[in-house]
Amino acid sequence: MAETTGRRERKKAQTRQALTDAAVRLFTERGYDAVGVREVAEAADVSLSTLFKHFPGKEALVFDLDEDLESALVAAVRDRAPGRSVLHALRDHLVDTRTAVRTDDPTHVLVESTPALRDYARRMWSRHEQALAAALAEATGLAADDLAVTGLARFALEAPDLARRTGDDPARALRELFALLEHGWKDTPLADPAPAAGSPAPGRTG
């Protein structure tokens, strides 16, 4: 029975990979909007109904690791080393997994050049917020809807995208964002703080 189950799972994985490979190739060659799901199914040598058993829609064909990404995100919190803070565990996991994207990777190039796929990727990644919040609640003893839990979950999911837009070193940028969260905002010496209510404006003595 175990052997049969293992063979079935391998076959399922092979079919999904064949569909993803065919989709990326066709979308890259002809453009995302010019290719239909039936053409992808034919290129992968499967029926259209088989395609929809594995993927809910056209955009999903390019993203085959959604469940794995969520599991790894949750595991980073639940399986962190004893004494290691949740914040540091999340930071290091995201630095390792979300900032090392090869800009010449065909899938990355396709997603970045296709607005529909960029939007889908963002929505897909954001869907992990609930699972991450649940893991953070379990780790901290707080309620799943506590602002500290939901705020950290949202921050952790949004920060990698922001870090990747800042320049050539997204890993450093992501660490800086987490440091800002950990240590709090501090105005620079050059900042001009607004006077407290009732205080004279700068340059006035009374």
Image: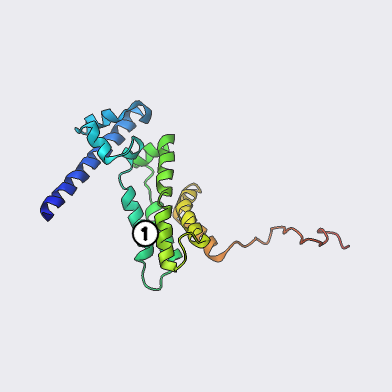
Residue 59 in picture, x, y percent from top left: 36, 37
Residue projecting furthest to the bottom: 83
> Please, which residue is most extreme toward the right here?
206
Rendered location of residue 198, percent (x, y): 81, 61
Report which residue position mark 1 lands on.
Answer: 74
- Which residue is rendered at x = 42% and y = 54% of the image? 130
- Taking depth in this image into account, of 193 and 85 the one nearest to the observer is 85
Horizontal placement of 141 versus 16: left or right? right
Against 205, residue 25 (above or below) is above
Q: For residue 35, which quarter of the picture?
A: top left
Residue occupying the point 27% across, 36% down: 52
x, y (%) of residue 169? 46, 52
Residue type at mark 1 is Val
Foreground residue, 105 or 201? 201
Choose between 131 and 34: the one closer to the eye.
131
Visible residue check, residue 27: yes
- Disc 1 crowd rating (10 Å Cα; few below 14, some 14-19, many 20+) is some
Q: Residue at x 44, y 55 (%)?
A: 171
Q: Is residue 120 above or below residue 1?
A: above
Q: Is residue 21 visible?
A: no
Disc 1 element: helix
- Dividing the picture into quadrants, the one containing residue 195 is bottom right
Q: Position of residue 81 (x, y in %)?
A: 36, 70
Residue under the image location 43 percent in, 53 percent down = 129
